[in-house]
Image: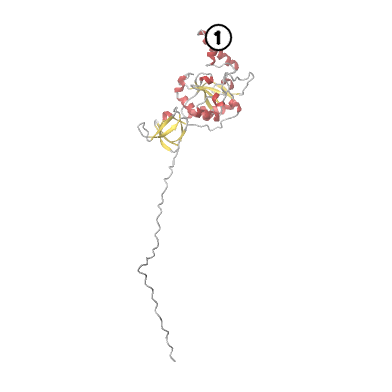
Amino acid sequence: MQTVAPTITPTTTPAASPTAKPTRTPTPTPIPTTTPEPTPQYTFVGKVICTADEFVNIRSQPDTGSDILGQLPANETADVLEYQNSWVHIVYDGTEGYVHSSYAYKSTSPTVPVPMGEWAEILVNPTNLLPDDFTVELADFEGGQVDARILEISTAMFADAKADGVDFLLVDAYRSYETQAGYYEDMVQRYLNKGYSRADAEVKAATITARPNTSEHQTGLALDIVTPSYQKRNSGFAKTEAFAWLSANAHNYGFTMRYIKGKEDLTKVIYESWHWRFVGAEAATAMKKSGECYEEYTGILD
């Protein structure tokens, strides 16, 4: 018996419709990627503080004719990249450029703690007198005496200035009641010799040498500072390198220039660029930024 082979029916792939559109795999649209600008990496060698009255221009090059990129405001601090003769290469608030060193003084801070306490906040002036029984523990300092609590920070300030190439000379610090009374009477006599009445002589004298119990020197917190090359206590001291260092850095050590130019009506004392008073770093820094005198800062205006 023969086995009959099955018939195989061929299969065909149907032809594509002439109207059908070919299927295509969509090509993805490339998304451009951007590489962020690298953040500049700086190596700073210190800080400077602006000592200009309002601001100093930040320039693109160490040249007064170069483009102005921004401004470093008065009393603000900038990081230093390098010093170039009379120019300082700085970075301030994201702006890199150059400022003239005449208005950007090296900022120095103490490596010892700045003392603080209510004792440092005492206000002494013609209407806020020291009590008759006021006493203070004293320590010897630079040929004079200071409140023992500010000995370390005062020593640090003098030493740090010297390390920056600036020499200080202390000409007065603590005075006893008797010493202050003697100084005041001597000043009164000068005006009497000029023909002033006793009443007028006392008023004039008090603007230069305080009456006893109204002088900050009796607290042991006030220093009269000059420099060996300029030892006069007059307006000329403000033109010295010693004054420039104090103006830029004393607040870091808790000292403020107590008798500011233009504030005589409030302090009742003439402008004294050599008279520096310890009030603590917080108060001194606040007054450095605001330009206030101590009466304004304390809010005790008489």
Amino acid marked by disc 1: Arg
Residue drawn at (58%, 14%) of the image: 181
* x and y percentages locating residue 43 in the rendered image: 44, 39
- Which picture quadrant has residue 211? top right
Crowdedness of circle 1 by 10 Å Cα count: few (<14), some, many (20+)? few
* Residue 177 seen from this side: yes
Picture layout, residue 43 above or below residue 279 = below
Q: Name the residue under label 1.
A: 198
Q: Which of 99 and 137 is in front in this view?
A: 99
Q: Is residue 250 left or right of residue 7?
A: right
Does residue 156 appear in the picture of this structure? no
Q: Position of residue 298 (x, y in %)?
A: 57, 26
| Up/down of 10 relative to 79, above or below | below
Where on the picture, by quarter, is residue 15? bottom left
128 in relation to 22, above or below: above
- The residue lying at 44 percent from left, 32 percent from top is 72
Q: How is the image coloured?
A: secondary structure
